Image (spheres, helix red, strand yellow):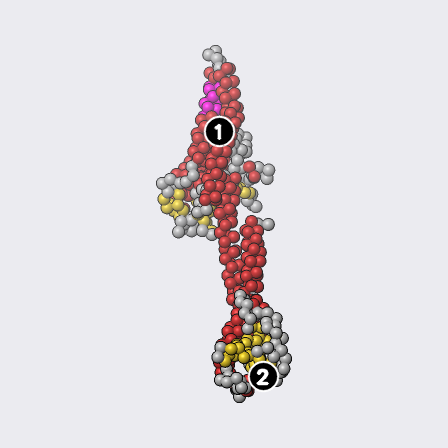
Amino acid sequence: MRIRTAIFGVYVIASAVGFAGVMGLVLRDVRLRYVESMRRTLGDTAAYLAAFAAPASPDENWPQKLAALPSRVDVLRVFACNGEGRVVFDSAGRDQGQKYAWSMTGGGRAASENYTVVNVAEVGNELRVVAPVRRAGELVGWVGVGRPLASIVEGVQAARWRLMGYAGAIGLVMTVAGWWIAARLTHSLERLTVYARNVRDGRPAAPPQSRAREIAELSRAFEEMRETLEGRQQVERYTQTLAHEVKAPLAAIRGAAELLDETMPVEQRQKFLANIRTESARIQRIIERLLELSSLEARKELRQTERVPAVRIATEAAEVVRPACAARGVTLQVREGPEASVRGEVVLLREALVNLLQNAFEFSPASGEVTLSWTKDNGRVVFVVEDIGPGVPDYALPRVFERFYSLPRPGTERKSTGLGLALVREIAHLHGGEATLANRPAGGARATLSIPAES
């Protein structure tokens, strides 16, 4: 499971549980609010009716005053009790003569949210509120009103559905916000993953920046670890490879030097001297290439970049290797492509193409042909170098860009330093591009150098 999904799942579950609890309390409170509003209205009505029915003399039949009022028992039931609580008047004629015990089922939370009053009762799905009737300060009875709670069911249901609609909209917003938060939290981790993979593949990569302190510290720790490991590995790698590659030419130089003698025939002496010059030149080339490759690998960004037309890079690279091609009888053709430009260091880009061209004509047979062209595809300028040589063995294709890995040249069976294609890859990565080498279906090899196009 992805960490983004886990964070989002925990957020949704926790929010759903908390939101459901709050909504349950709110939906329950809707009815209590309606009942409380009804209770206050009935209380005011009961107080008014009690004041209206209050007798002026001891012999006055005060409940009869209530009988004179218009009757709407479907909406409001009016009743009167004597001092003992017995019903002496009921507009609905339902409980005449019964004795009300107060409070009948209790007020408080059964009728509202936070009150307990002795003149309120909820009986038989009816809310009743009474007010005392007094004459000269003396209690003579009670006047009450009752209203069916069923009359508020429709309003309660409508309010609940409305609240549920609002809750659904809020829940949707919270879900979208939760996914956005989870994505933001994991975006920095994903960039760290991309950074680690670029480091693994030898690509130039800068540690991702983040406002989150923990992510920023983790990013710095990754960069410090990379620099430490690369420093150690680079020293070890270059020491081993240099010792291995220089070992053979040094042995040849030492052997030739030991065999040299002043009495040796001139022809043999010249042969051994030529061998010493050749092997020493090879050592020099290896050291120069190693220093160049080491310098490129240590760089994290380009310097003195400029906008360079693709035709300029191709033309200059072709002019560098054209004399060597002519000496081998190899034809070099530059096929112009679309008008395009790249941004980078001209010297490095030219050197990358020169290495690809040298590699191509060295593997081309006499009277062979090497072509250089370029295309523009998906925002990239792709330089293509093709030859009609023997191609690359399948076993060697995954390793051609490794340092010091080289195949014997046709005819001479000699190997190069094995650093040319490694330099090409480093230059491509430094420019945010890629270098590839593959076999052509018609024979020969095809090398590509892909660089982001400059708009």
The x and y percentages for residue 251 are 52, 20
To which residue does mark 1 refer?
235
To which residue does mark 2 refer?
89
Say what amino acid the circle numbered 1 marks.
Val
Say what amino acid the circle numbered 2 marks.
Phe
Q: Is residue 249 above or below residue 63?
A: above
* Kind of element beneath mark 1: helix
For residue 222, side relative to residue 304 (left or right) = right
For residue 146, side relative to residue 337 (left or right) = right
Residue for point 57% across, 46% down: 441
In the image, 52 versus 160, the foreground residue is 52
Residue for point 49% across, 36% down: 225
Can residue 379 be found in the magenta stretch? no
Can residue 277 be found in the magenta stretch? yes
* Kind of element beneath mark 2: strand
In the image, 268 versus 229, the foreground residue is 229
Residue for point 57% across, 67% down: 109
Q: Say whether marks 2 and 1 touch (CB < 8 Å).
A: no
Residue for point 50% across, 53% down: 181
The x and y percentages for residue 394 are 59, 39
The residue furthest top is 263
The span picked out in magenta is: 270-281
The x and y percentages for residue 77 are 57, 81
